[in-house]
Image (tube, helix red, strand yellow):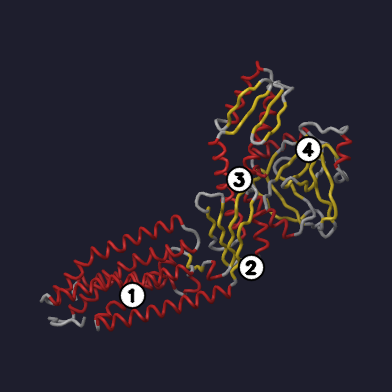
Amino acid sequence: MNRNLLYRGLLILVVVAIAAISAWPLEDKINLGLDLRGGMHLVLEVQVEDAVKSEIDNAMERILQDARDEGISTVQARREGEQIVVTGVPPERDEVIARIRQDFLGPSWDWDRFGDRIVFELTAAGRAEIRDGAVRQALQTIDNRINAYGVSEPVIAQLGSSDRIVVQLPGVDDPERIRELIKNTAFLEFRLSDYPRAGGGASSREEVLANYGGQLPDDVEILEGDITDPEGRRVGAQYYAVTRRSVVTGRDLKNARPSLGQFNEPVVNFTFNPQGAQRFGEVTGANIGRGLAIVLDDRVVSAPTIEDRISDSGIIRGNFTQREVEDLSLVLRSGALPAGIVYLEERTVGPSLGRDSIEQGLRAGLIGFGLVVLVMLIVYKLTGINAVVALALNVVIVFGALAYFGATLTLPGIAGIILTVGMAVDANVLVFERIREELHAGRTVKSAIDAGFSKALSSIVDANVTTLIAALFLFQFGTGPIRGFAVTLSVGIFASVFTAVFVSRWLFDLQLARRQRVERLSI
């Protein structure tokens, strides 16, 4: 055996050995998709208009605060649809409004004066940027929450360029908890509160209003909180007067983790980042004796009195269960959703259905493989064994590559493997038919094999490259099972070219090298 043949044989052996080691045992090395393993399939829609309204409200608060800081004490603002109407600003102070827009609001906002009214309005580009940002942030937040929960191989992707998100979670056994975990907005705020100062909230909104003489100040609003029994069940509501502007928010958190309080009740321990800690320390130090409302998703969780300066850490109490503090800690760490989430579609796939799919897929693959082997042996006689060996190595390499790269195998992915088997045989058929033609033309066996491979190569490459391009487009724009099909098809194409051209040619050369002169070829 010459060196070239030996080195090629060693290369084939190394590739197959690596693939076999990577894929064995299959049940531990191959990640199964939702349709094979069971789990949840969700289609969510981000309520992007919520994000637009939130941006408008934030801009309105910024305009009011900055205008008052500039000495315009008569300024008032209200939201009308998607516009902010500002009054109480003298025309000679318009340069202040222009500076606020330039320094803090940016080019996403247009403004103009109409008599004694100044109207701010989002530009079309600004509105589109907020919507796109809301979807991207929701996608990232959901991904953070699911990964922190511990779901293996989740699929979380935007559906095209729409406001919809596809979530596929293999192996999930608590769908209700996952739904709450995804949908929970968990926007945490710390706000100052003046009424009531301690001992729980007021019994009604009217009681809060009476404390202010029937008219709330512009920078104060009434928020509701729950009254719970010792088991954590809601038994009533209470009300608090809190400032509209937050002292700090959940965005200022560095970490949040479940813990136990003074009486062994479940609580959430939190720490602030340096900027949040500094701001929180300044505000609490200047407001000793006032109430501090801890607000979660516009509901007051608790409202303790500030007894001393609080800097970088604290505790959230609220008659939580242990599971609730675990989920709340997780959600706070992963960040708040920028807008509400609506469930458009939900499917739960049971593991028994997944097992049936695997069995049917394997049955179809084995039947297809067996029929291909039978046809190759009948049509191409002993030379068909060459194609069968290449085909078997092809399947080993495909599974090895899937395991090595951590790809997820889905039911369409099994279809992709079966299709790969057909395409691999197609390449062998092209080569074998070329060899037949050359033998019928009177060539020797060696020259017929050389000509068969050289003339069929361009057709094999063309066919596989065009299929690979289609598979790449499916992977780029598809989701879930479609991407699984594209992955197995792409891997199968590379494996097919390697086995049909390189391995099959090596087998022919090995056959020729074992005999001095070959007069006939069983094909």
Nearest to the eye among marks 3 and 4: give it.
3
Task: Give x and y (percent) for residue 386.
Answer: 27, 78
Which circle marks residue 323 in the picture? none
Q: Nearer the viewer, residue 215 or 243?
A: 215
- Answer with mark 2 or mark 1, whichever residue precedes in sequence: 2
Circle 2 is placed at which residue position? 173
- Residue at 62% across, 26% down: 100
- Please give left or right for residue 517 compared with residue 319 in the image: left
Q: Please tell me whether mark 3 sits on a helix, a strand or a loop.
A: helix
Nearest to the eye among marks 1 and 3: give it.
3
C-alpha span from label 2 to label 1: 38 Å
- Answer with mark 3 or mark 4, whichever residue precedes in sequence: 3
Circle 4 is placed at which residue position? 221
Circle 3 is placed at which residue position? 48
CB atoms at circles 1 and 3 under 8 Å apart? Answer: no
Residue 64 vertical placement versus 498 (above, below): above
Circle 1 is placed at which residue position? 391
Task: Give x and y (percent) for residue 329.
Answer: 68, 53
Task: Give x and y (percent) for residue 245.
Answer: 72, 36
C-alpha span from label 4 to label 2: 41 Å
In what quadrant of the picture does the N terminus appear? bottom left
Residue neighbourhood size for the residue with mark 2, other residues' Cα within 10 Å, grouped as few (<14), some (14–19), many (≥20): some
Q: Nearer the viewer, residue 190 or 360?
A: 360
CB atoms at circles 3 and 2 under 8 Å apart? Answer: no
- Residue at 78% across, 51% down: 317
